[in-house]
Amino acid sequence: MNTISMLGLPFLVCLLLSLVLSYLGLHVLKREIIFIDIAFAQIAALGALTAHLFLNVPGDSIRAFLSGAGATFLAALFFAVARRKATQLPIEAVIGITYAVSAAGALFLIGKSACGHTHIQTMLSGALLWVKPSDLLWSSIVFAVLSSCFLLFRKSFQRISDGYEQAVAAGTNVIAWDFLFYALGGVAITLAVHLAGVVVTFCFLIIPATVSVLFSKQWKFRFLIAFLTSSAGSAAGLLFARWLDFSAGVSVSLFLGVFLLACALVIRIRDVLLRDKT
């Protein structure tokens, strides 16, 4: 009973993250923008730190979150325009440069802050075990809105993810749709980092989507596989953290990695057996 009371809220938060980030991760893989979450996390951190240091906004407040989200909106517009206009550079290079500049700015501001080490620790590993019911409530509202938007605009998002140049040739306003996709994704990543940290967010975004690619080519089945992988990894990681008094975020990330290796091994064994039969 004590385990349920301690891990119940963190597990529900993980389920929320799994629901949104599993879907978002499928697009991230298709668009080959693997490091978008780290870039958005740094940009959001830079916005929140700026508000904290210059406007005296508490670092864990809604206003700090909104400041970070506002910074991601600007980044979303920049990425959408850069992908269409800066054709001489791959979008992943643009994202990487943006991440490096944002990280340098965030580290500079952290150095000026009296609690710089605390900011770094929270940003990287999060505080899953210290999630409050109020955090779960307002996070659920935000994620519900984001999920509704992703569902409503799924066909346009998928059209661009499946083939950017084909979408341009078909007359799709790719800048507008990309801005909307990046803006929604930026808010989701900003909130995920606020709840669970950069490491867990990156793992939720990439690892389950990668597992799903190993087993299916259809979007709906990939999403289901990714969600189940995230959920199972969360449960196993949280129980492991409880058992060994270990960091929850690190444990969840570790088990997601273990699941990926196990699935890759299963696929490898299957391919070998099929080749031997032929």
Image (cartoon, rainbow, N blue to C red):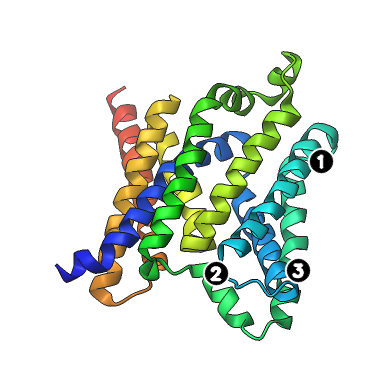
The residue that mark 3 highlights is 104
Local secondary structure at mark 3? helix
Type of amino acid at the residue the image marks with label 3: Ala
Nearest to N terminus: mark 1 or mark 2: 2
The residue that mark 1 highlights is 89
* Residue at left offset 80%, top offset 32%: 84
- Most foreground residue, 221 or 74: 74
Residue 193 in the figure: left or right of residue 273: right
Image location of residue 133, percent across then percent down: 36, 62
Residue 88 in the figure: left or right of residue 162: right
Mark 2 Cα-neighbour bin, 10 Å: few <14, some 14–19, many ≥20:
few
Q: Is any part of residue 210 visible from this angle?
A: no
In the picture, the quarter occupied by the C terminus is top left
* Residue at left offset 49%, top offset 69%: 125
Q: Is any part of residue 176 visible from this angle?
A: yes
Image location of residue 78, percent across then percent down: 78, 44
Residue reaching furthest left?
1
Q: CA distance from mark 3 to mark 1?
A: 22 Å
Image location of residue 8, percent across then percent down: 26, 60
* Residue at left offset 37%, top offset 28%: 221
Location of residue 126 with respect to 274 vertically, above or below: below
The residue that mark 2 highlights is 60
Residue 151 in the figure: left or right of residue 58: left
* Residue at left offset 54%, top offset 75%: 121
Specify the quadrant of the image occupied by residue 269.
top left
Nearest to N terminus: mark 3 or mark 2: 2
Specify the quadrant of the image occupied by residue 270.
top left
In the picture, the quarter occupied by the N terminus is bottom left
Mark 3 Cα-neighbour bin, 10 Å: few <14, some 14–19, many ≥20:
some
